[in-house]
Image (cartoon, rainbow, N blue to C red):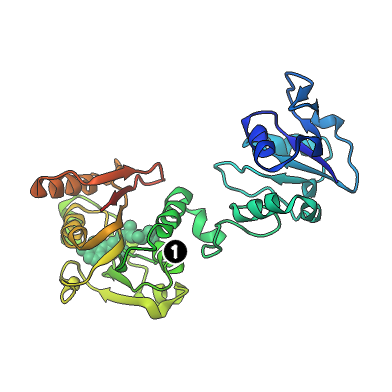
Amino acid sequence: MKLYIWGTGCGAGDLVDRWLDPASVTAFLDSDPTCDRFLGRPVMLPEQFEDSSDALILVASSHTEEISLRAASCAIAPEKLIYVKNNWLLSDRSAACPGAEELPAPLLEELRRRPRLVREPLWASDGALSERDLEGDYVRVRTLEAICRELDGVSGAAAELGVYRGGFARCINALLPARTLYLFDTFSGFDAAEAAREGRGFTAAHENTSAERVRSLLPHPDKAVFRPGLFPATANGLADERFCLVSLDVDLEESTLAGLRFFVPRINPGGYLLLHDCLSPLLPGVQKALRRYEDERGTHLHKLPLCDISGTVVISV
Ligand SMILES: C[S@@+](CC[C@H](N)C(=O)[O-])C[C@H]1O[C@@H](n2cnc3c(N)ncnc32)[C@H](O)[C@@H]1O
């Protein structure tokens, strides 16, 4: 095999360092080579790449957009390139690449474990999540995936308050197939009085759902316990329940506060609560509810803000 590596930065250095004998690299490609050798191997312009049936390029740079365009302009076939690092746009650029089988086995295994690489729709490393699950808010969903991996020794059910059409609930159910998943929602939109108090006019936009619709989306519907109606009344009878993971996503202040009051004390140590929209300037009630909860408890919760689309804050217990 003639193995090329596109990139001469730390990504390329790390790739070789961890997985490859530098002598196995035919050459490095770089659109702006500052020197003609890297790690003892030649560096060439992409235009100088000489294709052959056994040639393969590992792209070890996250500038994938730019590189794919440059490759196309050099008439390098997409199946010659394996994008070892993708970028935040998250479109997998790796095409089916038969030559990948020739890579050293540990590297191939590592590549297959990573998201979005080589021949399979590997958008998530354990295969529980689909490409579609990740389209809307990749950071939030991959964070959920990482959190779920941390829950092995933590007992308790999972729950979502604010389910709407079940997009995120589906992910929780897929990632925690053995856990009971409580789903709290009116399944007919916000409480009109609460929305009016907070001056929100989006209630109608959340009416187009139903518990049946959500159930049909779940990969493990047998684990779901639907609690339709207005929270917190729908938590009746659950005072002794314990949780390992809660998604709290009700947009408005009073319902968020009710959710914090009910769930936080019932999350087992090592568990998490994802508070959606907490940093969103569009929904200031969520952060106000968190402040009110901390004030009334006289404590600061352990919080990790995410850079996801809606400003989720992860609370760890
Ligand atoms: C933004 S949506 C949830 C989106 C969902 N978590 C997702 O990521 O796909 C907010 C939902 O909260 C529900 N909701 C708000 N306040 C509620 C309350 N007090 N009790 C029950 N459901 C409530 C609304 O009906 C709406 O469906």
Q: Position of residue 262 (x, y in %)?
A: 17, 62
Q: Position of residue 83 (x, y in %)?
A: 68, 44
Q: Nearer the viewer, residue 159 or 253?
A: 159
**The quarter of the picture showing ligand 1:** bottom left
Q: Position of residue 298 (x, y in %)?
A: 9, 45
Horizontal relation, residue 170 to residue 23: left or right: left
Q: Residues within 10 Å of mark 1 (few under 14, many from 20)?
A: many
Name above or below for residue 46 compared with residue 312. above
Q: Nearer the viewer, residue 316 or 308?
A: 316
Horizontal relation, residue 67 to residue 123: left or right: right
Determine whether the residue tagged by mark 1 lies in a helix, strand or loop.
Answer: helix
Name above or below for residue 129 compared with residue 2. below
Name above or below for residue 227 compared with residue 27. below
Q: Nearer the viewer, residue 220 or 164?
A: 220
User: Which residue is pictured at 41% across the width and 45% down the height?
Assistant: 308
Residue 190 in sight: no
Work out which residue is located at the far bottom of the displayed protein and give it: 222
Three-letter code for the amino acid on which mark 1 is drawn: Cys
User: Which residue is pictured at 14% across the width and 50% down the height?
Assistant: 293
User: Which residue is pictured at 19% across the width and 71% down the height?
Assistant: 235
Tell me the residue that label 1 is attached to: 171
Horizontal relation, residue 273 to residue 232: left or right: right
